Amino acid sequence: MERVLMLLFMLNQGGPTTLEFASLEQCKAAEPIIIQNYREMTGNTVLARCIRMVLPAK
């Protein structure tokens, strides 16, 4: 089972936020748009990374 997540860290705002995507390509395409919007809404620095995890079925 494969999962693709974007990890978002908003500095000075506590723990990470995760968003799930269907593919790594979708995640990477959305990354700059999401970072820009979070930055505009909060005024804080945002760090993000797309990761792909392959997990065992059970």
Image (cartoon, rainbow, N blue to C red):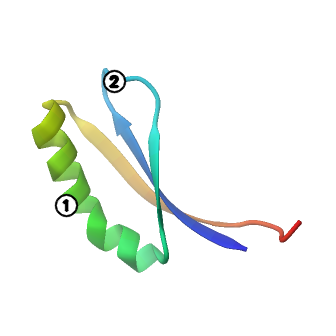
Q: Residue at x 14, y 38 (%)?
A: 41
Q: Residue at x 76, y 66 (%)?
A: 55
Taking the image as shown, residue 58 lies to the left or right of residue 12, namely right
Residue 28, image x, y percentages: 34, 69
Q: Amino acid at mark 2?
A: Gln
Q: Quadrant of the C terminus?
A: bottom right
Q: Earlier in the sequence, mark 2 or mark 1?
A: 2
Q: Amino acid at mark 1?
A: Ile
Q: Residue at x 29, y 73 (%)?
A: 29
Q: Which residue is mark 2?
A: 13
Q: Residue at x 24, y 55 (%)?
A: 34
Taking the image as shown, residue 45 lies to the left or right of residue 9, namely left
Q: From this view, report whether residue 49 is shown above or below residue 23.
A: above
Disc on res. 20: none
* Mark 1 residue element: helix
Residue 57, image x, y percentages: 84, 71
Q: Residues within 10 Å of mark 2 (few under 14, many from 20)?
A: few
Q: Which residue is mark 1?
A: 33
Report which quarter residue 56 is drawn in. bottom right
* Mark 2 residue element: loop
Q: Residues within 10 Å of mark 1 (few under 14, many from 20)?
A: few
